[in-house]
Amino acid sequence: MKTVFAVLFAASLVGQARDNTPPEGFIALFNGKDLTGWQGLVELPKRDKDPEKYAAQIKAANEKYLPHWTVKDGILHYDGKGQNLQTVKDYGDIEMLVDWKIPPHGDSGIYLRGNPQVQIWDPEKNKGIGSGGLYNNKKNPHDPLKLADKPIGEWNHMRIVMKADRVSVWLNEIQVVDNTPLENYWKPSDPLPEKGPIELQHHGDHLEFKNIYLKEL
């Protein structure tokens, strides 16, 4: 009887992906063990063009900010006391998957090409407007099409597709942004950079992330 139960239990797990194991065609930006592939924040406009000076900027940022981002039980935790975490590599056109969880009144986001941002926040704190919108847009739509957030304290799943400067976002399988341009926050009169880092945004709140996957398009 125990053998039959074990077989049935194992069968029930078939098709259920393990955390931080990328689906076919994707890579894991977060390996579930450490911060490989990530670094402390050096904002896009502040990057020194000299490689040696930029390396020194990164070294200082890592020493200052990385201690606030830790990994436990396959989850990336942020203590709210440092700065954004950004990818070492720059990316252009992408499809990205990410699971996140925030506390009451929490605020965060996903920077694309080093520009803010696909919004993550507590809707109750923000007049019932949900997560997923392109918050810093001025000329183009910035609010999500629908409220799709799960209750605070539960995991949310986000899918982001970016081609050229246009972004589409699905939150918990519901589309909340439809092929909308993301504007250049740092230089509003310029087009969005062709490439830049992906960032997990700091806003002084405890944050949790896992299952961060990416496909370059």
Image (cartoon, helix red, strand yellow):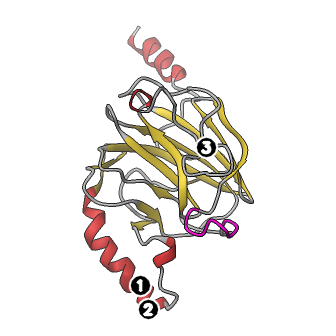
Which one is in front, 209 or 8? Answer: 209
Q: In this view, does 62 lie above or below 32?
A: below
The residues bearing labels 2 and 3 have C-alpha atoms spaced at a distance of 38 Å
Assign a secondary structure to mark 1: helix
Q: Look at the magenta stretch and give its main secondary structure.
A: loop
Image-based side of 191 in relation to 82, left or right: right
| Residue 187 is covered by the magenta coloring | yes
Q: Where is residue 175 in the image (x, y as percent from the top left)?
A: 67, 32
What label sits on residue 52 in the rendered view? 2
Q: Are marks 1 and 2 in contact (CB under 8 Å)?
A: yes
> In the rendering, at what x and y percent does residue 13 appear?
51, 25
Query: What number is the disc on residue 55?
Result: 1
Left or right position of 2 against 119? left
Q: What residue type is labelled 3?
A: His
Residue 195 is a magenta residue: no
Q: Decide: few, some or many residues near mark 3? Use Cα within 10 Å; few <14, some 14-19, many ≥20.
A: many
Q: N-terminal of the two: label 1 or label 3?
A: 1
Out of 88 and 116, give the one closest to the viewer: 116
**Three-letter code for the amino acid on which mark 2 is drawn:** Glu
Q: How far apart, in angstroms, are the residues tagged by discs 1 and 3?
A: 34 Å
Distance in Å between CA atoms under marks 1 and 2:
5 Å
- Answer with the quarter of the image where residue 54 lies: bottom left
- 22 shown above or below 146: below
The residue that disc 3 covers is 142
- Of the numbered discs 2 and 3, the one sitting upstream in the chain is 2
Over which residues does the magenta segment extend? 185-192
Q: Contact, CB < 8 Å: mark 1 with mark 3?
A: no
Residue nearest the viewer, comparing 44 with 68: 44
Q: Please tell me whether mark 3 sits on a helix, a strand or a loop.
A: loop
